[in-house]
Amino acid sequence: MAARLLLTRPAWRLRCSTSSLHIAFPSPRTHGIAHSFTPFTTARSSALLVPSFQTTHFSSVSTTEKDKASQQEVLPVLPVALQPKDDAFAIEKDTWAERHCPKWMVPYIQISRINRPTGTFMLLWPCFWSISMAAPAGQLPDLSLLALFGTGAFIMRSAGCTINDMWDKDFDKQVERTNKRPLAAGKLTYPQAWVFLAGQLSAGLAILLQLNWYSVAMGASSLALVGAYPTMKRFTYWPQAFLGLTFNYGALLGWAAVHGSCEWPVVLPLYAGGVAWTLVYDTLYAHQDKKDDIKIGVRSTALLFGDKTKPILNMFSAAAIAGFGTAG
């Protein structure tokens, strides 16, 4: 039975010699005392900032319990001013839509991801690359065409998100990251989503009809990819490849909009490079849902690649660069 020790709370000032430090801060392993630090204080104006020191002593405990406690890592406590708030590391869920828009509008903004524009840029870049490469030598790309494709990318990306949520409602309910989406959470009904989708596709068609007929036919054919992509995770471990085929279709459409035809030796490498690029970023994105995907039976390249994700994505990154370089 260990002897009962008195509790002490000395506030030690900084010592200069090693021996003094050992006296001021005795080892918990040799003395049977577990140390903990409290926020920093100053003794006098001439003193340096030093931690206030507190000891916790063991009384009437077994040797085994002492050993376990003495082996625990001792960590300093940050000053109060530097300690993070309870929600400092919480993921920000509210966006400008939730804060400023009418409540009836928020579910429509959420289902179309208007409040999260990153995907629009991912869809838009291949269009801009293709239009810029198709521009006559020494001339800037047509700004009106860039604006038209920018509007079209915004509309069609939003429509694609609506289609995705309609297909994946039951899956979304079971995934922590997606169970607050409007259809999964019951904020919208299927009839409401269908009406909204019809409006989105009509707006997209209005943009498409501003282009030449070759581009209209090519753009209309992309709807097959848009509709099929959400189902791919049910049948293949390569849904990210189908997303790449869908999101980078603008590499073909942009050139067609400028010239009324496609120069395949240029646009196909550009398209292939874009697909490889999408595989990289969407595989990284898919890793956050791996546990839920396994539970509900959804497939992805994140599950397929597993621990080999890094070297495989390095290969796809090299393929993307090669495709872009070949396109010129």
Image (cartoon, rainbow, N blue to C red):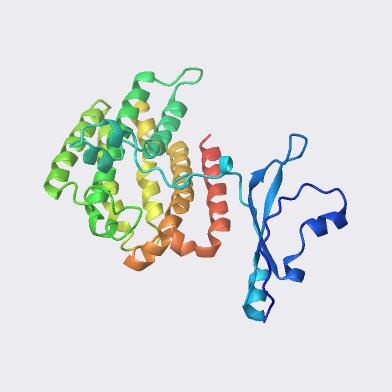
**Camera-nearest residue between 68 and 107:** 68
For residue 77, above or below residue 201: below
Residue 17: x %, y % from top left: 88, 51
Measured from the top left, where is residue 234 in percent x and y?
31, 62
> Residue sitting at 67 percent across and 43 percent down?
41
Return the residue nearer the eye: 322 or 66: 66
Q: Quadrant of residue 24?
A: bottom right
* 31 lies above or below 117: below
Q: Is residue 125 left or right of residue 29?
A: left
Name the outermost residue toward the left.
Answer: 191
Residue nearer the viewer, 287 or 272: 287
Q: Which x, y percent locates residue 224?
A: 26, 48
Q: Is residue 218 visible?
A: no
Q: How many marks?
A: 0
> Which image quarter is the N terminus in?
bottom right
Image location of residue 199, percent across then percent down? 17, 35
Residue at the spot x=37%, y=26% of the render? 258
Question: Can residue 187 be seen here?
Answer: yes
278 above or below 239? above
Q: Nearer the viewer, residue 281 or 28?
A: 28
Q: Quadrant of residue 54?
A: bottom right
What residue sits 32% from the left and 63% below the top? Answer: 235
